[in-house]
Image: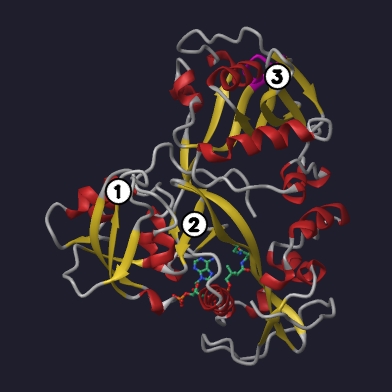
Amino acid sequence: MAAGAGAEVMSPVAAPAGAGGGRAAGYTFRTAAEWAEFGAVLDLAYGGHPHSPAHSAVVGAVFEPKRSLVACYGGRPCATLAGYALEMTLPGGPSPVAGIGYVAVAPPHRRRGLMRELLRRALTALHEERAEPVAVLHSTEPGIYGRFGFGSASRAVEVSVPTEARAFAGEVDTAGLTLDVVSPEEARAAVADVYCACLSQRPGLFRRDDAWQRRAVEDEPESRHGAGRLLCMVVSGPGGEPRGYALYRLRPAWQRSRPRYALSVREVFALDPAAYAFIWRSLLDTDLAGAVSAAARPVDDPLLALLDDPRSAAPTVRDQLYARAVDLDRALTARTYSAPVDVVLEVRDAMCPWNEGRWQLTAEADGGSHGAAACTRTGAAADLALTAREVGAVLLGGGSLVQLAHAGRVAELRPGALRAASAAFRHDPAPFCPMAF
Ligand SMILES: CC(C)(COP(=O)(O)OP(=O)(O)OC[C@H]1O[C@@H](n2cnc3c(N)ncnc32)[C@H](O)[C@@H]1OP(=O)(O)O)[C@@H](O)C(=O)NCCC(=O)NCCS
């Protein structure tokens, strides 16, 4: 994205009466100067919760102004979009992806096409600069980004396990493992090492440098909501080497004079099944805790197979990461496929019209022996017809083309093409992205 001018930090001004018409008339757009100029817009956009200086420092440290955009009215920022250069695990391995966050428009300036224009500019810049082939974002509401070609690419389950239901389905051998509970600051190296070693476990995980690592263990007092400070449980192997960790908080609660503390888990990673089971065993055995909950776990979290009574966890599925092919050919060849595939896709893409048309995708299973997948324009008859949104939904291996076809969102034009392509796009384990950006 092109470099931008500096900026004053001011409150957004009132919107022009009657402006808009969906084309963001009367507004100027530029790259961001610094994180501080996002502040006033985000404060208003998210309901008057100004960021504390400590939080601004942590979020500001991962901010990439040259990749981020602001829309201005009367010289003042009134809409924002943050861009990040991430390296994310896709099926088959790591790939550069463009993270998008903090898409926000100050209330007086809404429904005038500013979000659309910011996204259009960001995606067009990625395309013109042949930057990251895939864009990803977390969305506050599921209904926003489909129209822009982003598909629901990973799902998460919210779980809450009553500690009475903590029995495991089988024996877990935790011999030689030890447990410690320390502050995230003390556990920083262990957290970073374990997370890094787990990166290839699932699509959706992205590499965290020191600044992202600080963001991952941030302990903002204003977001504790009555809970204690963030704690870190670290499991180590016989040689003292870290093998897993959990970041969590405890919120005091009492019922009929009995302690029913709420233990909420932010993040759990482990290098092997024994360490993973030991962490959950220890969380569920925490004195005073009435339930152990996590707002987001992978849909195929081993926890649900560890529990003898997984129904007690009341897993509730929701959408999580949204993904989009910036350049269809580069996006589809940035990953591997679970089965051999040779399919012609007829793609519609109003937001990124350079992706429109027919594309032939060929690949061997899991990368095969003849190199990467190939995706080229073709005049051949189409096997499947779909929009960019459905492509986004299956990019990370999470969505199902069969499911989308049964919902009428993918058309099978050659009998048999749907099941074969669906099996090739699916990935086991399922994608998951524990951290919003
Ligand atoms: C969501 C938000 C960024 C939209 O900005 P905006 O400039 O008003 O959006 P636009 O005018 O560009 O709208 C583009 C399209 O999205 C739709 N849209 C906008 N907000 C939407 C929402 N919350 N849910 C569903 N659709 C929405 C518009 O109706 C319009 O649809 P159309 O193209 O079919 O006519 C803005 O309302 C906001 O800042 N909300 C609070 C912060 C937030 O939730 N941000 C999203 C972070 S992931």
User: In the rendered image, is residue 323 in sight?
Assistant: yes
Q: Is residue 285 magenta?
A: yes
Q: Which residue is mark 1?
A: 364
Residue 390, image quadrant? bottom left
- Label 1 crowding class (10 Å Cα cut-off): few <14, some 14-19, many 20+? many
Please tell me whether residue 164 is drawn above or below residue 344 in the rendered image.
above
* Quadrant of ligand 1 in image: bottom right
Question: Would you name the residue on which mark 3 appears?
Answer: 236
Give, as a three-letter code, the residue at label 2: Tyr
Q: Which residue is mark 2?
A: 322
Circles 3, 2 touching at the beta carbon (< 8 Å): no
> What is the secondary structure assignment of the residue under circle 3?
strand
Q: Which of marks 1 and 2 precedes in the sequence?
A: 2
Instruction: Name the spot of residue 134 as percent of width and height, x first.
Output: 49, 62
Q: Quadrant of the C terminus?
A: bottom right
Residue 328 located within the stretch drawn in magenta = no
| Residue 261, x across and y down, in percent | 71, 23
